[in-house]
Image (cartoon, rainbow, N blue to C red):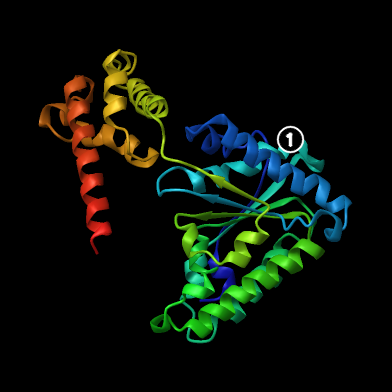
Amino acid sequence: MKVQECVLSEEVVTADSTEAALWDAIVVPEAIKERLRNQTLLALLVRPELPFEVTALHGLCTLYGPPGTGKTTLARGLPAQVARFVPGEEVRRIEINPHGLMRAEHGQSQQRVSELLGEYVPGLASDGVPTVVILDEVESMAVARSAASLAANPADVHRATDAVLTALDLNAAEHPHLFFVATSNFTTALDKAFLSRSDAGILVPLPEPAALREILASTLLTLADKYPALGDLARSSAMNRIAEAADGLDGRRTRKVVFEALAQRLDTVLDPGSLTEDDLAAAVRNAVAETNRSEVSRATH
């Protein structure tokens, strides 16, 4: 795989871009969004004006937490949120697939990481437009070297992680208009030197019941545009009880559970507007039970 094939997307967005909807769709405490936005702006506005030796800022933020909590979607929606505050009111978004890099042939990972992060990405952003680079599931390319498995070619793993660190140092010094957002489900798998270069580590946790209610209700209200009766369910007091029962689900699964509820009965498949609070509550119970079984299975293997 060529390094350019590891770039999933590259585009310049503005504040009124449709990308703004990605940010709004994720239900997390507002403080998380504010911290991510502010950290990004600090890097894009202040770092170019000061030498790296003064700021020690690498232009890197790590979003971490359980799968399904919206880390990647927040990162994708981030450029539209900061565009209005930067010169030119445009921000480039580059999304990287680290897994593609790490599928390189034996001994090639280091070279490909160096080419991608040290040459190709800076080349895409050579026009000076503020740029957000998304490294999704970064643990695949910045593996903790102290824990590298002998069965997984640790020498290649070490060299690839070294290449990531070198590229971050180079970009911090030479390309302060680049800002990297890394996402990780398993920070224990990340190299300590990578974490030390992160200007901020932001936890994106599982949603609290109030957020679960908002996710369920917003999904139902969207469906209510076509099936009006679902609007009544979304606004009913039963949603509080159902959201409490959903505690432990991630945001992605919570949205899906509405459709799982619709699929339980042929009647609701043919007429989604006939969905009841009992249907939704049953689907939530099933989803929570499946999640618990999955966690037990992982813990015992």
Above or below residue 272? Residue 107 is below
Above or below residue 236? Residue 113 is below
For residue 229, what is the image quadrant?
Answer: top left
Left or right of residue 181: residue 124: right
> Badge 1: how crowded within 10 Å, few (<14), some, or many (20+)?
some
Residue 92 placed where, x, y %? 68, 50
- What residue is rendered at 63% in x and 67% in y? 193
For residue 116, what is the image quadrant?
Answer: bottom right
- What residue is rendered at 55% in x and 36% in y? 23
Amino acid type of the residue that numbered disc 1 sits on in the rendered structure: Arg
Above or below residue 152? Residue 199 is above
Q: 3 or 255: nearer the eye?
A: 255
Residue 44 placed where, x, y %? 76, 48
Left or right of residue 285: residue 47: right
Report the label total: 1
Residue 80 seen in this snapshot: no
Residue 94 placed where, x, y %? 62, 56
Left or right of residue 18: residue 37: right
Residue 203 seen in this snapshot: yes
Left or right of residue 217: residue 45: right
Residue 221 placed where, x, y %? 37, 21
Which quarter of the image is occupied by the C terminus?
bottom left
For residue 5, what is the image quadrant?
Answer: bottom right
- For mark 1, give the secondary structure: helix
Q: 249 or 19: nearer the eye?
A: 249
> Label 1: which residue?
84
- What residue is rendered at 87% in x and 58% in y? 51
